[in-house]
Image (tube, rainbow, N blue to C red):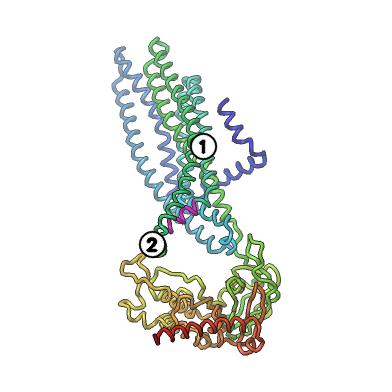
């Protein structure tokens, strides 16, 4: 009744359709686990299967052999001992034990080899999927939680390559030993088996609840780990000390940890009470069977050999059955749902390739935004509202506006990280959706606002923007010269082969924010793409480096189209087309002179920044006089 009540309680909240879906998902996960090893190491896996099968056969055969040995020894007292048969049985029994030991070593070795290969396969699949899904997934909290669960489950999923075989091996051992027991004493065997069923139900319920809690708490685990990173990663160390944040962040970490611990302990307390009760039932069943067999032997209803067989069988079954149930519960209660989530993750739609048209190599496109509207997935605010403008081939364009006006979003749409909700973007008059995605991406090179720090040497950091380019060292040096970091690199002991960061090399060089910015700009210029994009490229540059980049922006872009995003209007005067954004709309566009003559929003912002600059310069001059 207890077992039935638990299963009814477990299923009370689920209708038939949901249960059917879960069973289907579990079967699909099992099929995935069975097929996985044939994708990564089929020959090795077949050997592993054969060894596991032979190893699983030994316990039942050993019990029967030992029963025969005991039967022969009993004959000593009857004076009819067959010495040759006894020694043969003992010899075979010892050989089986030696083989069992060797099989265990081989199973452990093959399991490790197969798991390593499966881990590599899972890692590559995950990395390939993450590199090909739309950017919208990274903007969604729900999808970020799913990605985190997938990343945390990779090793667990990799271990399924041997888990299924291990479970089947245990099941085969259990069934074969049970078969020997049932064939001779069916009622005793059934009584013993029935006492383990409640424990099975209790373990399954506990595992399901723990895994469900683990998945539901992913956001809290991510936040807890974030506070841990704030307290442990070098990039936060200065502000942590300056603002005395260590105690505050540690308190938040402890609060989350205690909250999660309390939830987990609550699940464990309730589940362990059930498990303790069912364990008592299992132990009583074991004692009942042994006591009954001993009593029957004592009164002559059973011989010593049969008693030995029963004790050996229930000893093997009591060891195998809990391990089998534990693995079964772990797989179907925890691993299978993770595999289901992993498979759903792999089924996420890739970035839409849409059309098959290819943009001609080295052609510089005419770019046109025609009444483009866009809002980020999961939000209810339009970032762009009917944006329209045209960028002619070879133009040097500046996108201006205060923070949140939509400048970076326009670049994301242009590079096809997202597609517009309404309106269209055209290249040479053809909708961007009709081009092959890779063809679109080859048109652009960019220095993004968030500079990426690659733990590679200088040369590789620069050439990553065009890794297929042959003999690109001279072009890399030229790009570094254009970004203003060449002279600094030449002063370093290893020059362009200097490793950056000390992540993998203790002799690596740690760069300042401005130096990383110059490396990123050099990386952008290294790629020979028709359109050059610099998104707030001066955020970490000093005044001299900033002036050098912006004063020579047109020259550095040469005949290519250049798109510059900056909040400093003085940096964009040299651009021959300025697009001014306000609240997601194009409020003005033209040259600097045209916009100043209109005395509109651009002129207002320009005068505002100029006045602040002049006030600062005046204050500095007065300070020098004092």
Q: Is residue 132 above or below residue 97?
A: below
Q: Quadrant of the N terminus?
A: top right
Q: Is residue 329 above or below residue 494?
A: above
Instruction: Write down the region rendered in magenta.
Output: 221-230
On the image, the x and y values in percent for residue 358 come to 62, 75
Q: Is residue 561 visible?
A: yes
Q: Residue 626 or 12: which is nearer the viewer?
A: 626
Packing grade of label 1 (10 A; few <14, some 14-19, many >=20) is many
Q: Residue 615 or 321: which is nearer the viewer?
A: 615
Q: Is residue 37 visible?
A: no
Residue at image position (56%, 28%) is 3
Q: Is residue 187 magenta?
A: no
On the image, the x and y values in percent for residue 57 come to 42, 34
Residue placed under numbered mark 1 in the picture: 206
Furthest residue toward front: 626
Question: Which mark identifies residue 281?
Answer: none
Residue placed under numbered mark 2 in the picture: 241
On the image, the x and y values in percent for residue 317 come to 44, 29
Residue at image position (66%, 77%) is 586
């Amino acid at each position: 009744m207890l077992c039935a009540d638990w299963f009814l309680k477990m299923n009370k909240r689920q209708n038939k359709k949901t249960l059917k879906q879960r069973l289907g998902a579990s079967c699909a996960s099992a099929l995935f686990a069975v097929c996985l090893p044939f994708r990564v190491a089929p020959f090795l896996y077949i050997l592993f299967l054969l060894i596991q099968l032979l190893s699983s056969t030994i316990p039942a055969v050993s019990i029967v052999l030992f029963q025969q040995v005991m039967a022969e020894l009993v004959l000593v007292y009857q004076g009819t001992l067959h010495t040759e048969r006894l020694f043969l049985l003992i010899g075979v029994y010892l050989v089986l034990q030696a083989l069992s030991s060797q099989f265990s070593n081989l199973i452990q070795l093959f399991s490790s080899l197969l798991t390593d290969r499966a881990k590599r396969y899972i890692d590559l699949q995950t990395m390939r999927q993450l590199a090909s899904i739309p950017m919208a997934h990274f903007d969604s909290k729900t999808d970020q939680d799913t990605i985190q669960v997938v990343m945390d489950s990779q090793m667990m999923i990799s271990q399924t390559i041997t888990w299924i075989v291990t479970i089947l091996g245990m099941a085969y051992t259990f069934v074969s030993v049970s078969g020997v027991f049932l064939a001779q004493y069916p009622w005793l065997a059934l009584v013993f088996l029935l006492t383990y069923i409640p424990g099975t139900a209790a373990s399954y319920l506990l595992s399901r609840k723990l895994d469900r809690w683990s998945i539901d708490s992913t956001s809290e685990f991510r936040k807890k780990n974030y506070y841990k990173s704030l307290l442990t990663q070098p990039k936060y160390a200065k502000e942590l000390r300056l603002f005395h944040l260590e105690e505050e962040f540690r308190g938040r970490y402890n609060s989350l940890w205690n909250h999660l611990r309390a939830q987990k302990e609550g699940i464990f307390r309730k589940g362990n009470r059930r498990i303790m009760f069912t364990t008592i039932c299992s132990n009583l069943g074991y004692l009942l069977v042994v006591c009954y067999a001993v009593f029957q032997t004592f009164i002559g209803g059973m011989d010593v050999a049969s008693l030995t067989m029963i004790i050996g069988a229930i000893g093997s079954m009591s060891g195998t059955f809990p391990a089998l149930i534990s693995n079964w519960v772990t797989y179907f209660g925890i691993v299978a749902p993770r595999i289901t989530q992993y498979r759903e993750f792999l089924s996420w739609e890739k970035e839409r390739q849409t059309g098959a048209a290819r943009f001609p190599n080295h052609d510089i496109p005419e770019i046109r935004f025609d009444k483009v509207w866009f809002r980020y997935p999961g939000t209810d605010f339009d970032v762009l509202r009917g944006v329209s403008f045209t960028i002619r081939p070879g133009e040097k364009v500046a996108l201006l506006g205060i923070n949140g006006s939509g400048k970076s979003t326009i670049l994301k749409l242009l590079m096809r990280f997202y597609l517009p909700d309404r309106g269209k973007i055209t290249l040479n008059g053809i909708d961007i959706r009709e081009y092959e995605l890779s063809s679109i991406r080859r048109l652009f090179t960019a220095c993004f606002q968030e500079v990426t720090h690659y733990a590679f040497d200088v040369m590789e950091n620069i050439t990553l923007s065009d890794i297929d380019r042959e003999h690109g060292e001279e072009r890399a040096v030229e790009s570094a010269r254009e970004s203003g970091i060449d002279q600094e690199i030449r002063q370093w002991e290893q020059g362009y082969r200097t490793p950056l960061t000390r992540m993998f090399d203790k002799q690596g060089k740690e760069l300042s924010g401005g130096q990383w910015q110059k490396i990123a700009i050099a990386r952008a210029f290294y790629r020979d793409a028709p359109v050059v994009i610099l998104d707030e490229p001066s955020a970490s540059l000093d005044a001299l480096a900033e002036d050098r980049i912006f004063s020579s922006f047109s020259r550095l872009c040469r005949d290519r189209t250049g798109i510059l995003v900056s909040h400093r209007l003085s940096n964009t005067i040299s651009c021959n087309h300025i697009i001014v954004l306000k609240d997601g709309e194009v409020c003005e566009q033209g040259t600097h002179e045209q916009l100043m003559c209109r005395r509109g929003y651009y002129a207002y912002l320009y005068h505002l920044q100029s006045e602040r600059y002049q006030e600062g310069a005046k204050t500095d001059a007065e300070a020098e006089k004092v």
